[in-house]
Amino acid sequence: MPGPRIPPDGPRQRTGTDASASGAFALGGDLPVVRLGFGALRILGRGGLGPPPDRAQALGVLRQALDLGITLIDTADSYGPGVSEELIAEALHPYPTGLVIATKGGFVRPRGAWKANGKPAHLREALNGSLRRLRVDRIDLYQLHTVDPDVPIEESVGTLAELQTQGKIRHIGVSNVSVDELRRARAVARIVSVQNEYNIADRESDDVVDVCTREGLAFLPWRPLGTRGGSRTLAAELPKVAARHGAAPAQVALAWLLRRSPVVLPIPGTGSPAHLAENVAAAGLSLSDEEFRALQ
């Protein structure tokens, strides 16, 4: 996806020059992060497989993310597979105080496909691999990447809870879950975050966002820059709001997510330094009540 264009001085109503303009959220109650993170899938090769076409640029983007004030980086063992975590460690280890690295396990990539594997043995192996590649003794936020239809979510999450008692996981999150699956996961472990597909055009997880808002759980929307497939009203209003702010529609989409709920932490990803800067600039774009309602 090409980077959105913004005027030289950034979008209007910008209140800061880095991600800190988006405010802060205490992940798990004890890990303060600014509410605009970085998703480390798109620094890889095509389809999230293999090394990046420009390794130096990928490492530079990761370092730039920190320079721009980002304090949460999200990855997964299936990104690469393994390559994203290796790049993060190469670029940023030893990690600065205040940086939260979140990763996930529960997907495998046979011939490039995404196949769920929530079996306890696999999750233990996946976690240990992530610890090794990230060069840490404990993962700040370890997320079940998806629900395996062949494994009860209680069994998968219960395994993560066991690993947490062993000191290998600080906080547990879940991804790609329904409200009922979230309820079941919370019955066996303390869940601090949910990561589902969600954006201004795809509101299928509205009910999950509402539960997270009510319960104080972080909600990390993946594919946060999606703007296609929404209502006709959205298709008409989004470019109007963007033009009013001198911003791109994708930036307005990020601003909408930040306004949607105080627990929402978008994690847009990119392999482009310019696109990264443009995403971060969106953290300072403030939508009025009228604009927010128009984009509903």
Image (cartoon, rainbow, N blue to C red):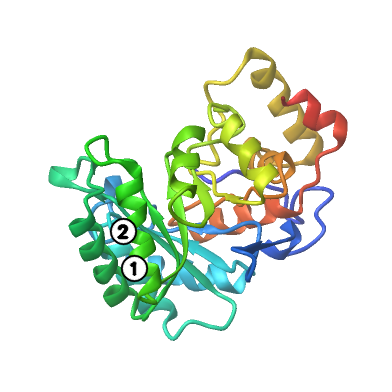
Q: Which residue is mark 2?
A: 159
Residue 249 visible, this angle:
yes
In this view, the residue in front, 199 or 125, is: 125
Which residue shows up at 73% across the image and 35% down it?
Answer: 242
Residue situated furthest top in the rendering = 232
Residue type pointed to by label 1: Leu
In this view, the residue in front, 117 or 121, is: 121
59 left or right, relative to 27: left
Q: Residue 147 is drawn in which quadrant?
A: top left
Tell me the distance, in whole angstroms, between the alpha carbons under discs 2 and 1: 6 Å
State the quadrant of the C terminus.
top right
For mark 2, give the secondary structure.
helix
For the image shown, how many numbered marks are present on the structure?
Answer: 2
Residue type pointed to by label 2: Thr
100 left or right, relative to 112: right
Which residue shows up at 34% across the image and 70% down it?
Answer: 87
Which residue shows up at 54% across the image and 49% down it?
Answer: 220
Q: Are marks 2 and 1 in contact (CB under 8 Å)?
A: yes
88 left or right, relative to 225: left
